[in-house]
Image (tube, coloured by chain):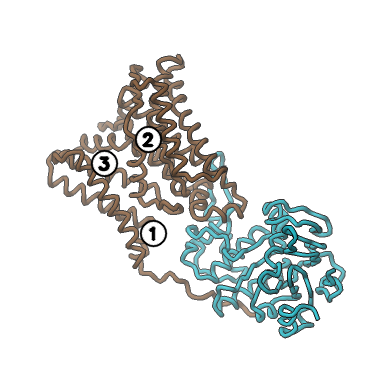
């Protein structure tokens, strides 16, 4: 038998820069450049923009979306989709508020009640998608209606005011490092992102998230329990949304059952950050920068006196531009 | 029924060794249709067996029975002489039977190393189970070098690999999993000349390591180059089981086309 020559030449002859642009790291780099460009523009356009307190305001403003986006990024890299996020947020806030008023278990009970909403909803989503093969889009939209209806019904469509100072401190306090004060919601968001980053980068579970998003059938053949991982990812996504809802309730001082759904803003940020809807691709760093990008855009436009109506238009244009560029780069 | 057992068997049989896996009178029926009919075929360690036959001859159904994808309607599978039952693919895997289908079952978005270790990762720590990437890269490198696989970097993402390199990655995966029987479904169908050569050498290296190998192929040249025995399927039946040295491509093609005379 002959000694084996190396196989045919690898097909990776694309020049370095193009390779970077095509890679998931490249998306993050491009987003960072866009973020700095935006910061530069707003700094020149408004004297109020480049300011520590304004930066912290942006951080607080994006934190709710950011917390939910962090956890649903895991699900979306694995090829899943969760549109029940917004409904779960409101439901968790209301559940926490009701628990505070009537359970007598205090803040731990309230947090537990809120998170339980996410765990239950995520589990039901996951079982229907993984075990019964229901389309995730349809399943989680159905769940959105169910959860929203139940929330409105059980709260009699009334906001539940929260007065417990400890619960309010979850989102209304500051973490002080030396002379700087960081609003708590921003810290929760950064911790959420850091946790997801660690999972994706270092753990077996993180590898399986990418593997399942890449080719679930190959994972099954390799003996990986894909269904169990999928169910767990839906639980993580919904529980992350519930956590965001608890922080939101603390920030607002009330569990509000009829708030507008945030799910599309969350999913838009994740997609903008470079996660492919078909799964297998994406980085939490992308989600973080995308969340900040949208936050800076909205904040800067507000400072320039542009109405929130046009901010929605801008957010939509940014997303459309991003996904279009993503398609175009594959042609080169 | 089948006279396969009357035909000349492999060298292993002559030596009186126990086959790693033996299919004994295996039949798969769909209603009145026999997809596989009364097939008896022993597979010995260190032996490459080629399965040839026209489309619809029952080759794919047969290997799916060995891989645990289908349960036979009747007949037995024996591993080292002991009867076994494969209700699902996992059972076959547990018996150290690994099948590489044409789609290769690789995660194209992951690295060569990630694919080689998929489902068998080295981890440390609880409760999160941290990946020991450096160690897995090193082990993958050694494995690739041992098998003579020419992939420059274990960090390379599979989507960037050539068809032959992907096949090699799938084979390395199977070697890592410690397979004793490797089933290959048309492994050279999508490969160029050089890549086919490298793949055939890889199969021969598996044989040197004492693995039993079963290859479905349409490529008569490849079949004659690497196999020790050739099993001819026609209309679900095993119509001939020849030692490769004692037959010719003409005879095999004639068997495939016209059946037993």
Task: Point out which mark residue A295 bears.
Answer: 3
The letter of the brown chain is A
Under circle 3, the secondary element is: helix
Residues A105 and A200: in front is: A105
Residues A95 and B132: in front is: A95
Whole-number angstrom distance, CA of label 2 to CA of label 3:
18 Å
Residues A29 and B65: in front is: B65
| The color chain B is rendered in | cyan
Task: Give the label, 2 or 3, closer to the camera.
Answer: 2
Whole-number angstrom distance, CA of label 2 to CA of label 1:
31 Å
Query: In which quadrant of the rendered view does residue B135 lie?
Result: bottom right
Q: Which residue is mark 1?
A: A23
Query: In which quadrant of the rendered view does residue B25 lie?
Result: bottom right
Task: Give the label, 2 or 1, closer to the camera.
Answer: 2
Q: Which residue is mark 2?
A: A86
State whether residue A63 appears in this view: yes
Whole-number angstrom distance, CA of label 1 to CA of label 3:
25 Å
Residue at 35 percent across and 66 percent down: it is: A331
């Amino acid at each position: 038998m002959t000694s084996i020559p190396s196989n045919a030449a690898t097909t990776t002859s694309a020049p370095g820069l193009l390779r970077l642009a095509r890679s998931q790291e490249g998306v993050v780099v491009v987003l960072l450049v866009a973020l700095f460009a935006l910061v530069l523009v707003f700094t020149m356009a408004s004297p109020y923009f480049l300011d520590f307190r304004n930066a912290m305001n942006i951080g607080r403003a994006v934190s709710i979306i950011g917390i939910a986006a962090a956890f649903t990024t895991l699900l979306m890299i694995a090829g899943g989709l969760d549109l029940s996020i917004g409904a779960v947020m409101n439901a968790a806030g209301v559940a926490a508020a009701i628990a505070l008023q009537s359970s007598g278990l205090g803040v731990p009970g309230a947090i537990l009640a809120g998170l339980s909403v996410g765990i239950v909803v995520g589990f039901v989503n996951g079982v229907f998608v993984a075990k019964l093969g229901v389309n995730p889009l349809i399943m989680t939209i159905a769940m959105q209606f169910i959860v929203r209806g139940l929330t409105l019904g059980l709260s009699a469509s009334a906001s539940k005011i929260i007065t417990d100072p400890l619960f309010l401190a979850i989102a209304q306090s500051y973490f002080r490092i030396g002379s700087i004060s960081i609003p708590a919601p921003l810290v929760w968001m950064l911790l959420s992102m850091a946790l997801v980053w660690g999972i994706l980068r270092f753990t077996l579970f993180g590898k399986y998230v990418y593997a399942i998003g890449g080719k679930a059938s190959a994972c099954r053949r390799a003996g990986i329990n894909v269904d169990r991982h999928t169910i767990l990812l839906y639980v993580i996504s919904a529980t992350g949304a519930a956590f965001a809802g608890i922080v939101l309730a603390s920030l607002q001082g009330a569990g509000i059952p009829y708030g507008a759904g945030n799910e599309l803003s969350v999913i838009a940020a994740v997609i903008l950050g470079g996660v492919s809807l078909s799964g297998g691709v994406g980085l939490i760093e992308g989600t973080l920068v995308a969340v900040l990008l949208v936050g800076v855009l909205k904040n800067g436009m507000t400072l320039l006196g542009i109405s929130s109506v046009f901010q929605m238009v801008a957010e939509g244009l940014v997303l459309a531009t991003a996904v279009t560029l993503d398609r175009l780069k594959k042609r080169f | 029924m089948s006279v396969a057992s009357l035909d000349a068997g492999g060298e292993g049989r002559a030596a009186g060794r126990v086959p790693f896996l033996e299919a004994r009178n295996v039949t798969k029926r769909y209603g009145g249709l026999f997809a596989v009919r009364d097939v008896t075929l022993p597979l010995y360690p260190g032996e490459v067996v080629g399965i040839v036959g026209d489309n619809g001859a029952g080759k794919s159904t047969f290997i799916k029975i060995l891989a645990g994808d289908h349960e036979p309607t009747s007949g037995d599978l024996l591993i080292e002489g002991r009867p076994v039952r494969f209700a699902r693919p996992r059972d076959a895997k547990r018996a150290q039977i690994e099948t590489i289908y044409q789609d290769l079952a690789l995660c194209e978005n992951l690295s060569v190393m990630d694919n080689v270790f998929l489902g068998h990762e080295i981890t440390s720590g609880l409760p999160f189970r941290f990946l020991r990437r450096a160690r897995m890269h090193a082990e993958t490198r050694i494995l690739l070098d041992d098998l003579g696989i020419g992939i420059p970097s274990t960090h390379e993402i599979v989507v960037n690999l050539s068809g032959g390199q992907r096949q090699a990655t799938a084979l390395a995966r199977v070697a890592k999993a410690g397979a004793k029987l490797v089933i290959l479904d048309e492994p050279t169908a999508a490969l160029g000349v050089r890549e086919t050569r490298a793949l055939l050498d890889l199969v021969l290296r598996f044989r040197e390591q004492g693995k039993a190998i079963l290859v479905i192929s349409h490529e008569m040249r490849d079949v004659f180059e690497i196999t020790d025995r050739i099993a001819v399927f026609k209309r679900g039946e095993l119509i001939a089981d020849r030692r490769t040295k004692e037959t010719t491509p003409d005879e095999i093609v004639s068997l495939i086309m016209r059946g037993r005379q």
